[in-house]
Image (cartoon, grey):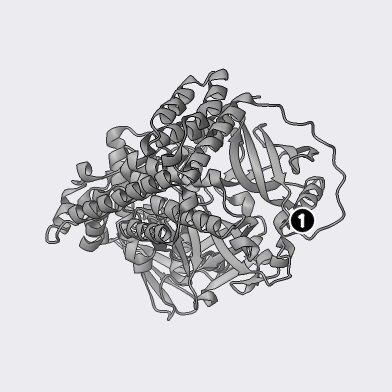
């Protein structure tokens, strides 16, 4: 009789993802106390369990855990089904120990006990054929997966290795993991049952395509598309009776992108300063058309551009002419990208409802909105099962005459708890929805299904790359990404928790109102912590300094970025022996004495690139139709003096022919060069 290898491979974390951590802990306590089940395995591979409370549970071979049966009235995966797995594992372990003991007693002259079994060899989910997928998930799931595959899906495949014992695929809507070797029944997606089969199927096809193409682990790519529409025979058969929507979708996408091109061209020619209600309404329509064809990234850029242009019309301080130029470049660059699925985000679900999900708070960021009449709190949340970070955003109206500082917002109620409590908590919910850009919402009317507990030591158990022990290695892994204007618009993409081995001295730059310190991670990498003063968070700098000087810092969460070839962390929260510290939510205290930092060294390359970007932003504001050749001459001369001849030539070409395409060429080159220089140039 063969043992159930699939049940033996289930660890506590996988069981918690299939059920919940509370059930796993309770079942483990019952087993340890002697109140566990008596289990048996029949010839067909079905495991049955009898419990002291009279309940009986059964789990046939070849079915997922939720397909097991139990005589208790609890719906879904109950504690008895979890207890069945734990009791079976304990029985198998005891039997193995007994056999080893018997062999040792029968051979007293043996030098050593028999070696343990060899570890599971690396395997790939590509081993599953479409017949297995069809049997596991059914025809509708494969039909839905095929439609998504035909549109193209952005995937990141992580093969099995020493650092990643479970192969996984990061999809736009979730991360699919295969913790049990060669088993589809225990694949984890985090999505609801309605989409689980579709997403696991896409993950299997992504592994299949990556193995065929030799794509290295951890590399983002677009899989599928019209050229790869023949993902599998069973998938094609499953959808044969339905008309293929590819032609209609392609037509709608082409119409929406053409509208983007025409509108951005008009904005550049007439100037964003002349934007009126008609153009704003056109921009809103274009945004809706892009969202309708699941072109999520340009739709988000169009929405942000509309906010910026409305802020200019309202004389709102949120208006940033450089940001307007960046958004215009982004919209036009995404239409030029060779990988349209990656640049547009087409085919990705706008919202994915997640099943019972555990989220770990990483901290809170406070910002202003709508001319000072609003405040925005952004709660950064780690999703350990998927290995990614998400953002829960809430906007608050500020009564007239109230400062609306972070300390005041800390007491506001969100999901039945204060913002401060949520910023340092574990959140378990059945009401979480995740957008394509990784923004989180909790459905109204279902707050009762959300529980909040203190953070505890949750940071220390986060998986990589959420928890970093070598920040430099993380930055190397991010190298080679596409330029920012065509990169997916992912919220909290750079949110991490850094394990801290040592905290260096603090310093303060009074000119830039910035606190800086050097942190050393366990790998010995020096990470520069950099936090700027904000009038909305008057206690940020002093609270951060006090936490860093406490001598008990173990972890710091924040937004990681490369700067001058070194990792820089913009902190969100600090974990000390006294608990987490949230600088943005701290109350104002007496000023902390700091050592003044020397002024930053001049950077002629960055200055020349920034001046050129500003000149292009001014052209976008006033309009290309009114452009004069001499407007770009000083910026081109500065670029030429610093050796940036290609950039200078692009400005000269724009001065000779002030067209939207020439402007886009120059702006895309300059913005990409400025990003790369800031990230990689060493002092």
Q: Residues within 10 Å of mark 1 (few under 14, many from 20)?
A: many
Residue that appears at 42% across and 47% down = 270
Residue 430 sits above or below residue 158 on the image: below
Quadrant of the snapshot with the C terminus: top right
Element type where label 1 sits in the image: loop
Quadrant of the snapshot with the N terminus: bottom left
Residue indicated by mark 1:
538
**Observer-nearest of 408 and 608:** 608
User: Can residue 466 be seen from the camera position used here?
Assistant: no
Residue 497 sits above or below residue 44 on the image: above
**Observer-nearest of 218 and 571:** 571
When asked about the image quadrant of residue 537, the answer is bottom right
Q: On the rendered structure, is 413 left or right of 354?
A: right
**Observer-nearest of 673 and 339:** 673
Picture coordinates of residue 170 (x, y %)? Answer: 41, 48
When asked about the image quadrant of residue 480, the answer is top left
User: Can residue 218 be seen from the camera position used here?
Assistant: yes
Picture coordinates of residue 220 (x, y %)? Answer: 40, 40
**Observer-nearest of 90 and 479:** 479
Q: How many marks?
A: 1
Picture coordinates of residue 108 (x, y %)? Answer: 52, 38
Picture coordinates of residue 512 (x, y %)? Answer: 73, 41
When asked about the image quadrant of residue 56, the answer is bottom left
């Amino acid at each position: 009789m063969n043992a159930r290898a699939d049940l033996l491979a289930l660890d506590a974390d996988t069981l918690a993802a299939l059920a919940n951590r509370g059930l796993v802990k309770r079942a483990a306590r019952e087993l340890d106390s002697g109140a566990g089940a008596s289990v048996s395995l029949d010839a067909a591979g079905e495991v049955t369990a009898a419990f002291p409370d009279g309940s009986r549970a059964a789990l046939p071979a070849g079915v997922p855990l939720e397909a097991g049966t139990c005589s208790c009235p609890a719906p879904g995966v109950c504690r008895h089904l979890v207890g069945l797995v734990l009791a079976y594992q304990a029985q198998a372990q005891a039997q193995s120990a007994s056999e080893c003991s018997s062999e040792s007693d029968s051979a007293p002259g043996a030098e050593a006990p028999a070696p343990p079994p060899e570890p599971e060899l690396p395997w790939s989910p590509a081993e599953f054929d479409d017949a297995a997928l069809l049997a596991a998930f059914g025809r509708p799931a494969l039909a839905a997966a095929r439609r998504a595959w035909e549109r193209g899906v952005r995937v990141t495949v992580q093969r099995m290795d020493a650092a990643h014992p479970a192969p996984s695929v990061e999809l736009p809507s979730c991360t699919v993991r295969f913790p049990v070797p060669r088993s589809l029944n225990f694949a984890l997606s985090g999505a609801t049952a309605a989409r689980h089969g579709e997403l696991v199927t896409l993950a299997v096809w992504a592994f299949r395509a990556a193995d065929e193409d030799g794509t290295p682990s951890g590399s983002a790519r677009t899989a599928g598309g019209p050229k790869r529409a023949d993902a599998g025979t069973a998938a094609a058969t499953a959808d044969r009776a339905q008309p293929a929507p590819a032609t209609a979708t392609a037509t709608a996408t082409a119409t929406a992108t053409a509208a983007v091109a025409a509108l951005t061209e008009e904005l550049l020619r007439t100037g964003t300063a002349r934007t009126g209600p008609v153009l704003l309404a056109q921009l809103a329509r274009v945004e809706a058309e892009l969202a309708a064809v699941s072109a999520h990234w340009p739709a988000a850029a169009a929405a942000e551009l509309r906010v910026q242009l409305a802020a200019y019309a309202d004389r709102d301080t949120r208006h940033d002419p450089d940001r307007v130029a960046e958004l215009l470049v982004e919209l036009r660059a995404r239409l030029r990208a060779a990988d349209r699925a990656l640049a547009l985000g087409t085919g990705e679900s706008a919202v994915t409802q997640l099943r019972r999900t555990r989220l770990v708070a990483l901290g809170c960021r406070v910002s202003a909105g709508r001319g000072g009449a609003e405040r925005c709190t952004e709660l950064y949340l780690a999703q350990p099962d998927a290995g990614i970070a998400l953002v829960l955003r809430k906007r608050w109206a500020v009564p007239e005459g109230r400062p609306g500082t972070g300390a005041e917002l800390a007491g506001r109620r969100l999901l039945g708890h204060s913002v401060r409590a949520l910023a340092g908590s574990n959140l378990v919910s059945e009401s979480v929805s995740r957008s394509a850009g990784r923004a989180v919402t909790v459905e109204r009317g279902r707050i009762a299904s959300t529980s909040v507990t203190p953070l505890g030591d949750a940071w220390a158990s986060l998986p990589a790359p959420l928890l970093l022990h070598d920040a430099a290695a993380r930055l190397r892994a991010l190298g080679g990404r596409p330029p920012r204007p065509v990169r997916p618009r992912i919220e909290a993409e750079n949110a991490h928790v850094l394990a801290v081995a040592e905290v260096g001295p603090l310093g303060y730059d009074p000119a830039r109102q910035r606190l800086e310190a050097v942190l050393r991670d366990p790998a010995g990498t020096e990470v520069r912590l950099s936090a700027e003063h904000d009038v909305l968070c008057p206690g940020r700098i002093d609270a951060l300094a006090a936490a860093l000087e406490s001598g008990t810092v173990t972890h710091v969460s924040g937004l990681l970025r490369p700067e001058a070839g070194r990792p820089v962390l913009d902190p969100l929260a600090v974990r000390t022996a006294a608990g987490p510290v949230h600088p943005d939510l701290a109350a104002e205290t007496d000023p902390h004495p700091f050592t003044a930092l020397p002024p930053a060294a001049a950077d002629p390359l960055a200055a020349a690139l920034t001046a050129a970007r500003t000149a292009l932003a001014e052209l976008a504001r006033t309009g290309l139709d009114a452009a004069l050749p001499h407007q770009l001459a000083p910026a081109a001369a500065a670029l030429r003096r610093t050796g940036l001849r290609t950039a200078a030539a692009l400005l000269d070409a724009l001065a000779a022919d002030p067209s939207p395409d020439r402007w886009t060429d120059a702006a895309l080159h300059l913005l990409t060069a400025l990003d790369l220089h800031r990230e990689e140039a060493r002092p």
